[in-house]
Every structure is written in structure tokens, then in C-alpha cells.
Image (spheres, grey):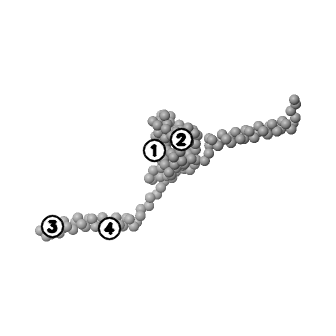
């Protein structure tokens, strides 16, 4: 049986479409829009062992452990512990605190609802880490109205301490 040019072309088209479908299914299961922390916690069984994308602000201290590091990432709902290679965490320049907004990071990694390696904690083992947006300092301006009220209250407290002492001193 001889395959004609037309059949050969159809077979190649079929192979290409099959490859596109398989690749789409693979990407759909592995890399999709960032999953919010509330969804991960509420449906931990569904995501357990799955490759997920998680995005948020790096907060607190980066805790280096030999060739690895722990990073806390808060997406506005909750913070989740991220376990990564140190070379990935070294990309983070600023972590969130009272005085600064931390780098916004995108993590692609394996979600564990009860990680056997880390005492049964919920965590994500990062395979990839990307800086989405750099962090920056936060200014905390002083509220002038509150400053005036604090000054008046201080003078009032001082007066209640000094005036009775002065009255006792001069009356005796």
C-alpha cells in the first residue's frame, strides 16, 4: 500500500494537532494563573503534589539553610512558606516590613498540604522564582493633628503633677 502526498499531508497535520493538544493539556496542568492562598488552603487536597503558580509580596526575613532558603510570601490573603534553592532566593532584594514593601515574586513549584520533609507543614517547593516588581520604602508621615493633641495631653498630665505639688509646697 502506497501513501499518497495528500494522505502524507493529512497525517502530518494530524501529528501537529495531536502535539498541540498534548502540549496544551500539559501546560494547562502545570502552569496556569496564580492560585490565591485562600484557594490553596481551602482546597489543599485538590492541589496537593501539583505544580502551581503563586504570587505575592516577599515578607519578613529570608531564612537561609545551607543551599536552601525559606521565604514567606503573602498574596494579601495569607502568607505561605516557600522552600527554594538559595540561588533562587538571592534574587529577592527587599522583603516587606513596616518600613518597606517587599519584592513581588511569582513562584512556580510543587504545593504540599502536609510536607513530609518539613514537619507536616503546608508549603510550596519552588522550582522557579521570578521578580514581578521590585520593592520600595514606605514613608509614614506624621499626622499634625495627632501631634498637637499629644502635646496638649502631655501638658495636661504635666500640669496635674506639678500644680498639686506646687500647692502643697506653698500652702505649708
Which residue shows up at 66% across the image and 39% down it? Answer: 26
Residue wearing tag 3: 169
Left or right of 149: which side holds 99?
right
Residue 172: where, in percent of width, then height?
Answer: 11, 68
Viewer-closest of 42 and 149: 42
Asked if 46 appears above or below 144 in the picture, the reply is: above
- Please tell me whether mark 4 or mark 3 is closer to you in this view: 4
The count of marks equals 4
Residue 137: where, in percent of width, then height?
Answer: 48, 53
Asked if 155 appears above or below 123 in the picture, the reply is: below
- Residue 91 occupies which quadrant of the picture? top right
Residue wearing tag 2: 45
Which residue shows up at 82% across the image and 39% down it? Answer: 10
Residue wearing tag 4: 152
Which residue shows up at 79% across the image and 40% down it? Answer: 13
Mark 1 and mark 3 lie on one chain; the one further toward the N terminus is 1
Left or right of 41: which side holds 152?
left
- Residue 126 occupies which quadrant of the picture? top right
Q: Are marks 4 and 3 in contact (CB under 8 Å)?
A: no
Viewer-closest of 21 and 130: 21
Q: CA distance from mark 2 to mark 3?
A: 75 Å
Amino acid at each position: 500500500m502506497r501513501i499518497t502526498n495528500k494522505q502524507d499531508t493529512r497525517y502530518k497535520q494530524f501529528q501537529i494537532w495531536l502535539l498541540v493538544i498534548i502540549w496544551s493539556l500539559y501546560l494547562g496542568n502545570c502552569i496556569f494563573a496564580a492560585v490565591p492562598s485562600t484557594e490553596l488552603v481551602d482546597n489543599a487536597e485538590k492541589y496537593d503534589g501539583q505544580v502551581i503558580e503563586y504570587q505575592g509580596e516577599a515578607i519578613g526575613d529570608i531564612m537561609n539553610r545551607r543551599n536552601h532558603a525559606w521565604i514567606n510570601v503573602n498574596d494579601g490573603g495569607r502568607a505561605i512558606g516557600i522552600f527554594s534553592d538559595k540561588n533562587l532566593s538571592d534574587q529577592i532584594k527587599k522583603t516587606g516590613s513596616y518600613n518597606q514593601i517587599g519584592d513581588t515574586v511569582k513562584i512556580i513549584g510543587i504545593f504540599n498540604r502536609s510536607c513530609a520533609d518539613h514537619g507536616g507543614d503546608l508549603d510550596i517547593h519552588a522550582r522557579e522564582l521570578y521578580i514581578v516588581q521590585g520593592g520600595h520604602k514606605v514613608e509614614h508621615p506624621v499626622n499634625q493633628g495627632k501631634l498637637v493633641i499629644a502635646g496638649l495631653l502631655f501638658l495636661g498630665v504635666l500640669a496635674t503633677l506639678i500644680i498639686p505639688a506646687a500647692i502643697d509646697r506653698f500652702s505649708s
